[in-house]
Image (cartoon, helix red, strand yellow):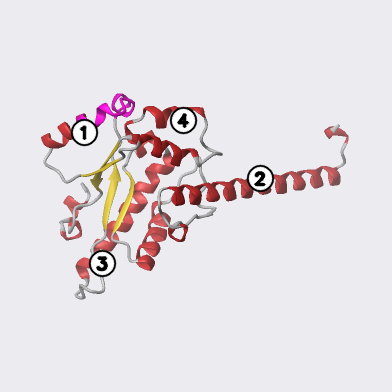
Amino acid sequence: MLFDLGEDELETLLEMFKYLLLGINVLLFLTAALELKACATYIGLSTDHVKVLEDPKLQDGMKNQWDAAHIAAIVTEYIEKNQIDAVFTFDDYGVSGHANHIATHYGVKKAIREQQEKCSASTDSKETKIVRGWALESTNILRKYVGLVDTALSFWLSRRKDEEKQFVFVFRPRWNYNAMALHQSQFVWYRRLFVAFSRYTFINTFRPILSVGSADLPAEQKKLQ
């Protein structure tokens, strides 16, 4: 029994348990990375363009608060290294309200703002270029689960609003489902239902995170961006 163990034996057992958990976490990480690359290949992307992070400061979990400045530093480095001119991420609700999704939004927003400020201060237009940030629109629960119906509704709503949007359509729902199914370790029953009935299988609407040149706005206005 556990209570019959001496102090040294108990310490050894706990140490073994710690390494067992570490091994499980590493295995889960490697599995998720392989699944992500398989999905990228399926949709036509080169795995050379897939970067998987294992960062102790960015661990998955609703209770894990991610630092926006840390995310911004990672995003900025990747933008500059790969000469990226557009970044797509979550909006400030993160589709499902997940804390990690929301933190990602604010981290990317910070990176985009800093990049725009850098461009505004630069006199060499060839050396710096504006990077656009796009946020995936979160909808209420009714719109989220009406599937294809929300395509028409999104068009109707966009005509009533004087704002810049970019629409990304998925015309082959089965193709989308197959791509998601490649994440085998995470494709549990409720995620299967989500992909089958969600409007995000048929249409994604993106709003600009910041308007181009917002770095030139007064501080009071920039807070509203």
Residue 174 location, x and y as percent? Answer: 40, 35
Q: Amino acid at mark 2?
A: Ile
Say which of marks 1 and 3 sits in front: 1
Q: Which residue is identified by label 1?
A: 154
Residue 51 belongs to the span the image colors magenta = no
Q: Amino acid at mark 4?
A: Arg
On-image quarter of the N terminus: top right
- Which structural element holds mark 1? helix
Q: Which residues are magenta?
A: 140-152
Residue 146 belongs to the span the image colors magenta = yes
Mark sitting earlier along the chain (1/4) = 1
Q: Residue at x 12, y 36 (%)?
A: 159
Mark 2–mark 4 CB contact (< 8 Å): no
Label 1 and label 2: CA atoms lie apart by 43 Å
Q: Which residue is identified by label 2?
A: 24
**Residue 192 has which mark?**
4
Q: Which residue is identified by label 3?
A: 118
Q: Amino acid at mark 3?
A: Lys
Say which of marks 2 and 4 sits in front: 4
Give the vertical position of 144 relative to 215 (above or below).
Answer: above
- Which structural element holds mark 4? helix
Q: Residue at x 25, y 49 (%)?
A: 209
